[in-house]
Each structure stands twice: as C-alpha cells, then as structure tokens.
Amino acid sequence: MIKHLRSAADLDAGTATLILDTAAEMAALAGREVKKLPTLRGRTVVNLFYEDSTRTRISFEAAAKRLSADVINFSAKGSSVSKGESLKDTALTLQAMGADAVVIRHPASGAPHRLASWVDGSVVNAGDGTHEHPTQALLDAYTMRSRLGRIDGLNVAIVGDVLHSRVARSNVLLLTTLGAKVTLVGPPTLIPVDIAAALSPGTEPSRGGKPKENRTGVSYDLDSVLAGTDVVMMLRVQTERMQDSYFPSAREYSRRYGLDVPRMRKLPEHAIVMHPGPMNRGMEIAPEVADSSRSTIVEQVANGVSARMAVLYLLLGGKA
Ligand code: NCD
C-alpha cells in the first residue's frame, strides 16, 4: 500500500480498485445502528484546512471518527497561521504531537508534497490549489461504479471550468487509469492548453474523430457529446480563482454550457449527472436537474465518507 495520497497519479488500477472495494465494505457500516469500527483507535488524524470547505472537511472528520481515530481539526483562521506561521512550522508542531495522518487542504498547488517531506505520518491531499483532489476522484469513481456497475469503458464528460478544477484533474487521472474515456467540455478559455495540445487534431468527438490510444478528449460543444455519454460531471465555475474574464457573461455561459432539462433529455436513459459541490444552481446546473433522479449529488456526499474511511484505513496500515 502507498503511504501518502497526494495525487490520483499515486494510484495504479489495482490500488484504486482495492480502495473502492474497501469503501464498499465501509458503506455497509453506514446502515448499521452503531457506525463505528475500532480500527484506528489510538491513532491521531489531523485535518489541516487552509481553505474554506464544507463537504470535504466534514467528510474526513466523519470518516476518521467512524474508524475511532482521535481527530484534531485545525483551520487556518484563528490559528497561528494568521500570525504568519509557515506551513513548515505548523507541520513540525503536528509532528511533535504525533499525528499519524495529516489531511491537508491548501490554496497552494503542491503543498501536500512539501508537507510529506516534513512529517512522518501519512499525508492525504484534500485539495491543493488548482492541482488535485484525489479523494474526490475516488468518491466519484465509487459513485459511478455503484450506479452503473463498472468504470472500464464508460464515457465520462467533465463539463465547465476545467482550467481551475482540481476535481477534473484528479478525475482524469483516476478514471483513465480505471479504463474510462474522459471528454473535457467547456469554452476554449476554460480548458487547459496542455491537455488540448497533448491531443492530436481529430480526437475531438465534436468533430467526429475517434480517439485512438488517448483516453482523454476535448470538446467545446456540450450538445454534441451528451448522446454518447454515460456520466456527465458538471463543475462549478470557480470565479474566486479567476483573475481575468473567461466568458462574456453568466447568462451566455449558462446558455452554452449549463445543464438544463432539455439538455439532460439528450442523455441516454441510464446516464447519471454528477457535481462535486458546492453548486451554482442556475449557472452550470439547473435546479430541476440537480434535484432529478439522475442526479447523484447527495449520494456523492454519502459515498465520500466511505471512500475517505477506506483511504485512511488502508494508508494507516489496515488490510482489505
Ligand atoms: C471542490 C473543491 O473544493 O475543489 N469541492 C469539493 O471538494 N467538494 C470543487 C469546488 O470547489 O468547486
């Protein structure tokens, strides 16, 4: 088993599948009256959050508590970080307290990598800047597998603000490792150039070309990809990360890239609609779509706890 989970690229297909299988066993626990396992009794998990979070922070806390770990929640606000303390000094403090695992969310891409060089415990990336969010990718993969029965061979469209999305990046890495085909969909200004450049011309599904070896495609036309899609994952438009204007107006964005009811009808019968949250209802996703039976948004939150339990359990030395 790997020691840290800093990137979805840390996971090969075997390890990722082991985590998903373990998450399924953890999920069985959620239905029980007593939701706790004694597995991590006496171990300390620190949640180190330098950025706002609702779902992810609560999810990691619930996961660690269900495994009976001692949980320390640290948020930058109200700590010595606001007095200018560096990540390194904070890390050394955690080290002195004997943290067995540190779950970190940080605005700087790469912060979990630095942290892993300063502490002895396992480091789990809970979102670093615009870089990665591997446990989100795991809970998303888990949700796809539980709804559709497999990941291998699925066509997944990830739609919207791909450029600023750590969720998209981790999902591309994990889903392609597990055999899915991913199409990134959005305005050209919000699709990273490196991905577009890596693809040879003709790999765009919207132009009728079929990707060959490459499992990641790009399209700027949402309407043209929906009919061939098993999973459509909508991303939040992350205005807090935008220094420039990337599209003419919210209305224009929504008209071209928002998932509304008429667009949802273009999806195959079995297809599911995902969103990592938080949503901008009415912008990238219509409220009727978010609340429809195709939507897995609430399920994703529940699955997040199981997936994170599996990660903590396996990283801290548990067996499947
Ligand atoms: C995402 C994040 O923080 O990266 N949310 C999450 O973890 N559930 C996506 C987002 O903020 O839009």
Image (cartoon, rainbow, N blue to C red):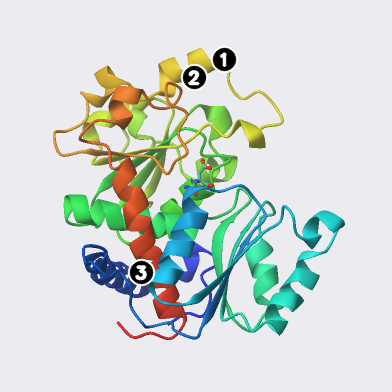
Screen quadrant of the N terminus: bottom left
Which label belongs to residue 121? none
> Callout 3: few (<14), some (14-19), or many (20+) C-alpha neighbours within 10 Å?
many
Quickly name the residue at label 1: 249
Q: Which residue is drawn at 74% across and 55% down?
A: 78
How many marks the image carries: the answer is 3
- Going from N to C along the chain, the mark reached first, 2 or 3, is 3
Locate residue 157: give its quadrant.
top left
Above or below, comparing residue 138 to residue 298 in the picture: below
Q: Visible in this render: residue 12?
A: no
Viewer-proximal residue among 298 and 259 = 298
- Mark 1 near ligand 1 (CB under 8 Å)? no
Q: Answer above or below: position of 89 versus 278.
A: below
Q: Is residue 137 left or right of residue 106?
A: left
Disc 1 secondary structure class: loop
190 to the left or right of 297 = right
**In front of the other: 18 or 53:** 53
Q: Nearer the viewer, residue 37 or 275?
A: 37
Alpha-carbon span between mark 3 and mark 1 = 39 Å
Crowdedness near tag 2: few (<14), some (14–19) or many (≥20) residues, C-alpha within 10 Å? some
Residue at 81% over, 64% down: 86
Residue carrying label 2: 253
Residue pictured at 58% horizontal, 20% vertical: 247
Residue type (three-letter) at the residue carrying disc 1: Ser
Q: Can residue 320 be seen in this view?
A: yes
Does the CB distance between marks 1 and 2 fall below 8 Å?
yes
Secondary structure category for the residue under label 2: helix
Q: Which amino acid does label 2 sit on?
A: Tyr
- Percent x, y of residue 229: 25, 37
Name the quadrant of the C terminus.
bottom left
In screen coordinates, is 135 left or right of 292?
A: right
Q: What residue is shown with label 3?
A: 16
